[in-house]
Image (spheres, helix red, strand yellow):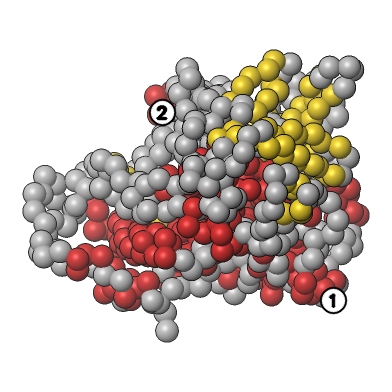
């Protein structure tokens, strides 16, 4: 038998639970070798994972692959997933408006592929060993990033205790790791969103193995689970979370399996929109910090990126360039009136698009996709900067809006009624500050200040440099409201009284100034630190980190805080919350080494401003992203 090396670098075990046929094309066979039927035998042993392919019938050059069913074990029951008798490569190809397919890239991308005779042996895909972090790890060590204070030492110990292993290798961290919690619910799972600050903490420390494993394993869980009532999610959807389960086999043997959750078990049964966006952002961060770009060049990883983009860039009935989502589909995962176009998703969408443009390999099939990304980025940037920005000048403009305007030249394009301006806003917004609206829809402006969306708009350069500076000015001017005793309010102000009852459905967890309804979330600290470093406001980040450091350890690292100023630990707040711990550590390291933070944010893209989407037609539109955006650039 001859060895076939599918990838130049591959460090992931691939158990039967993970290797579904729907995702199997990452093996990437060349078209010149097409056996009609294979039987795949999978086993997971310690640190080696073998894939033994036994040819069942004679190979046929002119026909695509056909495979027998794979066995998949879930919760002590056996289910079969079969691949239709179509091309093996097509099982992982991207179908959509941008003509993206992996088939054309298999022969050129998969290195060292050779076939001879009827027997094939696949070299083990092993998880383990040290990630070659090149310059990234050395830079961290040279600059002396280490746990110095007792609080930091405790945080690192807790973070490592939260690590989840799969087949003997680390694959993520649980959401919370409180040994006294008798009802962990889904807090004992690995969430894609929650793991990001943990991943950054490990990367900045020079430990990249867990991040690489996480990226590859979650990729193989991508979009093949059922959701509600046998409805399948769109191809490319990433799970919200996964759990490592141990299931019994015959002869008193056991097997570890990965069990993903796409929202079918979540409160409200809502699929996660932001998981795929965070996954792409983390993939870029891994390459930037470690200097290892071979991971993002893999065929399966490139295909995963395209699947996510195809899902997000699909045309619909919505004419906004922003991404349309349902309520509860992001960090604010309960009913809070954010359905439509919440700012958080738009900022993450912008980041994921910019990441993808950097990461996508230059092939003929990617040209249309890159063009679609550029057009969407241009339109999205213009839309958010022009219509979602609020400062004293804009509030005055809205206050004098005329309604029911019907024309291409209408000033009040979304038919916003001036009566929507809340009374609290008039005296709250500072003269030299501003922020981006939480949501914009026809006849509706959500004037609440959403912290994550505004901070990530700074990080991704979704806002202009002037707007980014004004957001930090507002946070500084309204420090008691947004930071208080524990940074940072997830949104301000809270919904109260009748508004709370109508919008949240009388949600007992989202009572005013608690949880997602104006609660204080320490995990937002790392996004704030990153935004401050980008804008040259390091002292502001240091103030927030110092404030959190005084209380987090004493309060046992809670998930969130309650009350208007964040004085009390949340009523239902989980203790030893992992992303609270990781957010603090990541912030601490970035404050000590701001140059490392520069790898994680994006500067203004001046070339993007030259892409005039509005000029593509002659319908009489006067505004375009070029003129409007350039007029606000700081030089």
Q: Which residue is painted at 67% across and 49% down in the image?
A: 215
Q: Is residue 226 visible?
A: yes
Q: Earlier in the sequence, mark 2 or mark 1?
A: 1
Foreground of the two, 78 or 606: 78
Q: Which residue is painted at 68% across and 25% down in the image?
A: 71
Place of residue 417 in the rendered image (x, y in percent of width and height, measured from the top left)? 21, 44
Secondary structure at numbered mark 1: helix
Secondary structure at numbered mark 2: helix
Place of residue 62 in the rendered image (x, y in percent of width and height, measured from the top left)? 48, 46
Compared to residue 65, the image places residue 259 above or below, namely above
Which residue is labeled 1 in the image?
142
Is the C terminus in the top left, top right, bottom left or bottom right quadrant? bottom left
Q: CA distance from mark 2 to mark 1?
A: 51 Å
Q: Is residue 477 left or right of residue 247?
A: left
Q: Which residue is painted at 69% across and 34% down in the image?
A: 40
Disc 1 crowd rating (10 Å Cα; few below 14, some 14-19, many 20+) is few
Foreground of the two, 265 or 124: 124
Residue 83 lies in what quarter of the image?
Answer: top right
Place of residue 523 in the rendered image (x, y in percent of width and height, measured from the top left)? 67, 48
Place of residue 604 in the rendered image (x, y in percent of width and height, measured from the top left)? 46, 73
Disc 2 crowd rating (10 Å Cα; few below 14, some 14-19, many 20+) is some
């Amino acid at each position: 038998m001859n060895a076939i090396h599918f990838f130049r670098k591959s460090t992931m075990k691939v158990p039967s639970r993970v290797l579904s046929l729907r995702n199997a094309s990452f093996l990437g066979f060349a078209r010149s070798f097409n056996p009609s039927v294979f039987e795949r035998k999978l086993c997971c042993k310690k640190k080696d994972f073998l894939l033994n392919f036994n040819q069942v019938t004679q190979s046929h050059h002119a026909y695509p692959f056909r495979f027998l069913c794979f066995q998949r074990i879930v919760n002590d029951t056996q289910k079969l997933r079969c691949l239709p008798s179509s091309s093996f490569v097509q099982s992982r190809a991207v179908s959509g408006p941008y003509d993206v397919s992996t088939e054309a890239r298999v022969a050129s991308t998969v290195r060292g592929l050779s076939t001879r005779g009827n027997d094939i042996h696949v070299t083990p895909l092993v998880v383990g060993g040290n990630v070659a972090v090149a310059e990234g790890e050395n830079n961290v060590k040279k600059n002396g990033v280490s746990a110095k204070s007792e609080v930091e030492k405790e945080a690192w110990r807790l973070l490592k205790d939260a690590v989840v292993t799969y087949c003997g290798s680390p694959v993520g961290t649980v959401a919370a790791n409180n040994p006294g919690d008798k009802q962990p619910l889904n807090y004992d799972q690995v969430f894609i969103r929650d793991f990001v600050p943990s991943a950054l903490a490990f990367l900045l420390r020079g430990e990249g193995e867990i991040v690489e494993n996480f990226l590859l394993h979650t990729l193989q869980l991508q979009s093949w689970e059922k959701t509600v009532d046998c409805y399948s999610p769109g191809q490319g959807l990433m799970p919200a979370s996964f759990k490592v389960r141990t299931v019994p086999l015959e002869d008193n043997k056991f097997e570890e399996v990965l069990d993903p959750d796409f929202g079918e078990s979540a409160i409200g049964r809502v699929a996660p929109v932001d998981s795929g966006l965070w996954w792409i952002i983390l993939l870029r961060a891994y390459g930037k910090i470690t200097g290892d770009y071979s991971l993002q060049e893999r065929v399966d990883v490139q295909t995963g990126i395209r699947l996510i983009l195809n899902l997000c860039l699909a045309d619909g009935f919505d004419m906004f360039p922003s991404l349309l989502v349902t309520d509860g589909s992001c960090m604010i995962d309960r009913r809070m009136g954010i359905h439509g176009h919440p700012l958080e998703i738009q900022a993450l969408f912008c980041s994921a698009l910019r990441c993808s443009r950097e990461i996508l390999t230059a092939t003929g099939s990617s040209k249309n996709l890159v063009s679609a990304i550029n057009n969407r980025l241009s339109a999205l940037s213009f839309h958010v900067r022009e219509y979602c920005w609020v400062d004293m000048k804009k509030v005055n403009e809205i206050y004098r809006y005329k309604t029911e305007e019907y024309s291409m030249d209408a000033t009040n394009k979304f038919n916003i009624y001036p009566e929507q301006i809340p009374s609290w806003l008039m005296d709250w917004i500072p003269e030299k500050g501003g922020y981006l609206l939480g949501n914009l829809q026809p006849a509706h402006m959500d004037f609440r200040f959403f912290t994550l969306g505004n901070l990530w708009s700074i990080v991704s350069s979704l806002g202009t440099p002037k707007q980014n500076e004004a957001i930090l000015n507002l946070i500084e001017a309204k420090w008691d409201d947004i930071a208080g005793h524990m940074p940072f309010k997830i949104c301000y102000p809270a919904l109260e009284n009748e508004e709370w009852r109508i919008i949240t459905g009388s949600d007992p967890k989202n009572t005013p100034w608690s949880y997602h309804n104006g609660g204080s979330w320490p995990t937002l600290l790392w996004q704030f630190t990153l935004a401050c470093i980008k804008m040259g406001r390091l002292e502001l980040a240091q103030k927030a980190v110092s404030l959190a450091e005084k209380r987090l350890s004493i309060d046992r690292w809670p998930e969130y805080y309650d009350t208007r100023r964040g004085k009390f630990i949340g009523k239902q707040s989980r203790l030893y919350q992992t992303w609270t711990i990781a957010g603090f550590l990541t912030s601490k390291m970035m404050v000590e080494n701001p140059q490392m933070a520069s790898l994680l944010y994006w500067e203004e893209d001046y070339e993007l401003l030259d892409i005039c989407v509005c000029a593509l037609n002659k319908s009489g539109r006067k505004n375009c992203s070029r003129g409007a955006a350039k007029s606000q650039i700081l030089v």
